[in-house]
Amino acid sequence: MKKIVLMGNPNVGKSVVFSRLTGTRVITSNYPGTTVDFSQGTSCLHKDRVYIIDAPGTYSLTPSNIAEEVALRVVKEADLIINVVDATNLERNLLLTLELLSLNKPLVVALNLWDEAHHTGVEIDVTRLEEHLGVPVIPTVAVTGEGIAHLAEYCSKPLSQPTPLFLTEDEKWKKIGHITQEVQQITHRHHSIRDIISDATIKPLTGIPIAVLIILSALWAVITIGETCITSITDPLFECYLPFITSLSDYIGPGFLQQVLIGELIDGQVDLEQSMGILTTGLYVPFGIVLPYVIAFYLIAAVLEDSGYLPRLATLTDTFFHKVGMHGYGIVPVFLGLGCNVPGILATRVLESRKQRFIAATLIAISVPCMAKTAMIFGILGQYGTLYILIVLIILALVYVVTGSVLSRILKGDCPEIFLEIPPYRRPRLDLVLKKTWMRLVAFIAEAVPYLFLGVLLINILYATGFLAWLGTVLSPLIVGWLGLPQEASAALLTGFLRKDLAIGMLLPLQMTPGQLVVAVTTLTMYFPCVGAFAVLYKELGLIDLGKAVCVMVCTAFLVGGLVRFICIGI
Amino acid sequence: MNAFITELEKGVSGKIIGLQGGCGFVNQLRSMGIREGKIISIVTIHPFRGPVVVRLDGKLITLGRGFANRIIVEL
């Protein structure tokens, strides 16, 4: 099958072109580096099946981070390259085009963002550009689909190889200067309101208050949407479900099967939060409590991503991230990690050095609570007031800063500086926002469901066989002596290895004081990531660094847990 | 007068006349559009040795202080 690779600078809309060509849904945003791994799909173009690959964005064929290395590897296997070029930024994009021409492979240029170029006063003579490059050039507006059919025609046509160009760096720039002068006309425009907003959100004096405002309103929106979802959708649904499960429980009767499926009866009743069976807590916690917040978070995240605000936030937080060994773009993994740690850890690929990626990934796993962890924190501590929730969040933030600065001092390696293009603000499109939220939701469920059943099953078996109780006794010096928790809490902490969200149900019946709960929740959040995050950490860091990261997590969790115990409970 | 862009006030613009550093670094700057002959203007310089934001060809670019310190402009 013919292999077509989409190449281009970051944030020029390659992924949108890709989904247009293949019908495959991929995540797109308005910031450089959304695609850190390649996506692939097949498409039927004029009766031929072709294989299309969407490579991560790269400025040149000399890679400077992992995502760019991926792009370079992928392009080598191409039979045809579609070079997606940002028409508003022709000059800078042409460097990659010239480098791609030297690869000696058939090439088509898609001149994307054609409408935006027109609006900003950039006019490009397409025919002349084709003459200069010696390859077909097609103007496209991928978000609306304009020009895509034309582009698809070229994908199935046999194309001649362009005459390879071998130029030195200086010659390339000279040629680029020459081409842009010949084909491009820029009508200067005055500062628009968009520029004024753009500047205000990136300058420290105005930008920081605006950032605080945006973050607070985003947080408020997530909580409001999440709560509304719970009270008006999931709770009524589970209320309808409860009679059914109660009669099922009566039908099965006491025994091993009831223990696994329904769990413990609380005061003779099935309790969705505390019973701990596969069909009770195992369904209610992930779908009834966590999922609504996940939906809310991804909805708001999609709006923020598509508007183009994140790179501005990265600029504002750069000084802070420097203290913890990264640079401002470290905000992107943290931001995504707040939804689910798995995409957060994957997004650490936008950072250049190994040291930075190690710090970023480890810190996410320790102290960036994903929506499941956040729901757990709220679920356990919510009844005692916002103060306790705030204490946990502040502790996590402090752990992020302290662990980060310690790691950045003791680890060897470079900490490259920020070097980031700030995209223009774009109005998020409702259809794209909804599509993206839906895709992430499906990914979340696909990942949650298998672990859901396996995790609960395993826990229930371990519990029924008495293994958990035995391990609890073994670990009791640590749990009771050091953390000041009741011995039964060790079962919850052990469960947390497999399912953090379920640990809520196990902590609730223990009648702990709010202080003890703060200790339990903080330790539970930090000491180990969930199975999914663990797998992706292994993939990104390798075995040795994974070992180091786990060491850091366990040590930090119990050190901080002990400290919090002395502050919140006393000796 | 020549100056490093970190020495400029915000709002000032100048023509890039030199990039200091190794070949890889200079190429990285150039591939982002920062190269000799371009007019670059300072949008803001963040305090506490924070990043510098510049405007070039109508686009905003955030640069770490160390990177910005290697760009020489003619006023």
Image: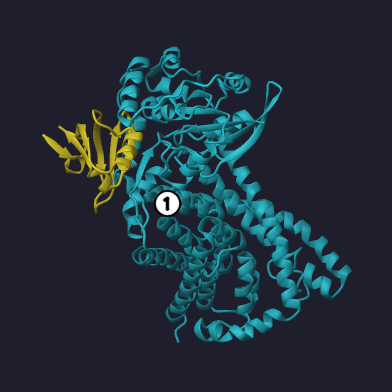
According to the image, label 1 marks what residue? A331
The residue sitting at the top extreme is A127
Tell whether A274 sits left or right of A82.
Answer: right
* Res. A528 image quadrant: bottom right
* Res. A447 image quadrant: bottom right
Q: What residue is rendered at 64% in x and 65% in y?
A: A499
Residue B26 drawn above or below residue A135: below
Badge count: 1
For label 1, count other residues whose C-alpha is less than 10 Å away and answer few (under 14), some (14-19) or many (20+): many
- Pick the front one: A201 or A511: A201
- Pick the front one: A65 or A138: A65
In the rendering, what colour is chain B? yellow
Q: What residue is rendered at 36% in x and 52% in y?
A: A327
Q: Position of residue A349 (x, y in %)?
A: 47, 49
* Res. A534 image quadrant: bottom right
- Quarter holding the N terminus of chain A is top right
Question: Which chain is displayed in cyan in the rendered image?
Answer: A
- Pick the front one: A473 or A571: A473
- Pick the front one: A173 or A308: A173
- Could you tell me the amino acid type at mark 1? Ile
Q: Position of residue B1 (x, y in %)?
A: 10, 34
